[in-house]
Image (spheres, rainbow, N blue to C red):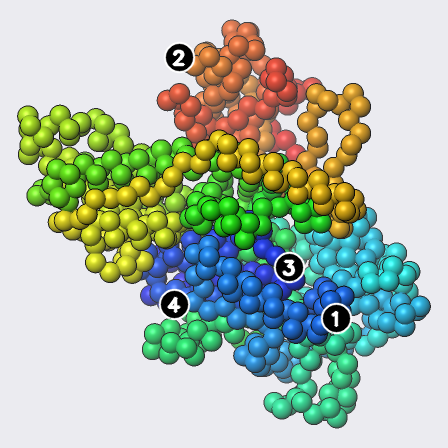
Amino acid sequence: MSHEEFPTDAPAVVTCGLPYANGDLHVGHLRTYVGGDVFSRALETLGQQTAFVSGSDMHGTPVAVNAESEGVSPESFALEWHEIYKETFPKFNVDFDNYGHTHDETNTAITRSIVRTLEQEGYVYEKQIMVAYDPIDDQYLPDRYVEGTCPYCGEHARGDECDEGCQRHLEPGEIEDPISAISGNPAEYRERTHKFFEVSAFSEYLSDFLDGLEGTSNARNQPREWIESGLKDWCITRDMDWGIDYPGADASDESSSDREADGSSDLVLYVWVDAPIEYISSTKQYTDRIGPDVYDWEETWRGDGEIVHVIGRDIIQHHTIFWPAMLRGAGYTEPRAVMASGFVTLGGKGFSTSRNRAVWAEEYLEEGFHPDLLRYYLATNGGFQQDVDFSWEKFRDRVNNELVGTVGNFLYRSLLFAHRNYAGTPDASVSPEVESRIEEAIEAFTAGVNDYSIRDAGNAAVRLASFGNEYIQRNEPWKLTDDDPEQAAQVIFDCVQIAKAIAVLFAPIAPDRCAALWAQLGEDGSVHDVTVDAALVPPARSFDEPEELFEKIPDERVEELNEKLEARVAEATDDDTDDAPGEETETTDTTDMDDIEPLTTDRISFEEFQELDIRVGEIVSAAGIEGADKLAKLEVDIGLETRQIVAGIKQLHDLESLPGTRVVIVANLEKAELFGVESNGMLLAAGEKADILTTHGDAAPGTKIR
């Protein structure tokens, strides 16, 4: 691991959190897999040697429980879902170099080897613990066989994680008021001997590790609380039959007498031991298939490899505490970066699988939408660690306005003009203005990758297309073909060069559509085999008449899709009014509350709140923005500096009376441009009348709100 800017000389591996082999995929699940695929492709576009791997998480209690309910073995149950995932991901152009699963021979062997090494190095010990037990059904209850109350925040929790509250990992015996998730019987605690991984021994290392960790800020900040409050050792075995057996002391580890002798004969490894090890196993399988001369998994995982994990934020702790400690203890390379995504909501509400309130992956495709449209929406709709709301209306607007109106419009009009007037690219060379603008786009793309921002990487191409529209409109080549044919040829050459640059830079986001664009341009080979340098290589001389790459989504299609969703939710609600634990619920009591928006069911962590830099400010000046009905330009003193902020308060407040008013602003919001005026922050106000938030006391400008 180098911490140098990408591309580096060391091999990289990009991994995605393993999907749990337990049910259908919906668009919320796809966010991390699309994100990982985009980032992997973008690295390769920079010239970085990269492997993109993942696999299905086959083990754990839910698989065993659901398999039993269907009357099949856990292995056959999980393998069926694994095959479905293998078929589904390519349909969304998520192109893993290797997609394995945690129950295969490679992962079983590497998992046992790593656990043996941890034990030999003195990081594993035995301990008597209290394990939940159902006395009526005479059954020990590991992990998610148990439900109860979180001892830290008091919310309802499952046996291994407070999934509805503080999202802490929970050790066996910690959950309060336990009940069996299978029978509903009250459970009791009984003493059992289990194996523990001494995570606490790595506290100092993990603190330093987080200091150097790249990726999203939530992946660095969230785990610090657990380190500062004192790390607890992790129980790495469970009382169940389904999983990887705890390894014996020697390499064969299959001797029942050996396993009985070390007290592990009836234990399997905790699912979070073998799940991340699949990253290593899948990379090894890739090397086994293509050869170490092409890609060497050991150089990555035991050498100086650039390891990037792309995950959901609900599993940050596992990837930034447990996993790097295991790697360190077993002599493997630590991750360079962890990119933790926000969640995806549906129309402002949480997905509810029990109510069928979801847009399912297969459903999206069956409705006839191209996968690259969803990839664009998920990859560029907000920062990666921010939550993204999916609605058919928002989806239509972004497709119609950005993909069709900006990118598609420029590509089709410029290439069609080039084909009809020059049978392809005219005889000219790129102008200094356009060459400079393409270079800026390459720099923005490169910076986006190195900032782990797939949104910025994708927007580099969209902004280049926006410039292309402005450039062709400004130069009006259709007026120049007769009056100044040399200048007309120059303008159209520039436009074709921009189109080629878009194909290169936008390919990680829209791989299929950019492959089609590459073919339309008459270029040889695949756009996925070139690097950013190709964006400035002169385009092919001739090409055929282009076709439009993106189609508008009609308003009536959105109405139709919303009706289908509402009907499906209503049917599921009639069948089963009880949501599964952890899923969003809706209240029907709206008495006297019609004018108040409902509270969101999605909670943020304290660490996420701390990422907001909310400050007291004092308005220095306020003036309306010419041509804008609602917008005003404010100069706000925030102690350390004076910020210019645009706010929609022009018609709701007497602007002349505002100077001297203490207000509350968000200081670390990304800059925006509204009506040509830069806004560097956000003024906080309540309701439709923009009731400006002020301070009760005399807090000085710049005071941070906590």
* Label located before the other in sequence (1 or 4): 4
Where, by quadrant of the figure, is residue 574 drawn? top right
- Residue 23 disc label: 3
Viewer-proximal residue among 449 and 97: 97
| Residue to which mark 2 is pinned | 627
Mark 1: amino acid: Gly
Q: Residues within 10 Å of mark 2 (few under 14, many from 20)?
A: few
The answer for how far apart the CA atoms under marks 1 and 3 are is: 16 Å
The first of marks 2 and 4 along the sequence is 4
Check disc 2 and give the amino acid type: Gly
Q: Which residue is mark 4?
A: 11
Q: Residue at x 64, y 69 (%)?
A: 78
Graded by Cα atoms within 10 Å as few (under 14), some (14 to 19) or many (20 or more), the crowding at tag 3 reads some
The tally of labels here is: 4
Residue visible at 39% across and 64% down in the picture: 50
Q: x, y (%) of residue 303?
A: 43, 73
State how far apart marks 2 and 4 are (Cα): 53 Å
**Residue corresponding to mark 1:** 71
Can residue 494 be spotted in the picture?
Answer: no
Q: Earlier in the sequence, mark 3 or mark 2?
A: 3
- Nearer the observer: mark 2 or 1; the answer is 1
Q: The N terminus lies in which quarter of the figure?
A: bottom left
Asked if the residue under mark 1 is in contact with the one under mark 2, i.e. CB atoms within 8 Å, the reply is no
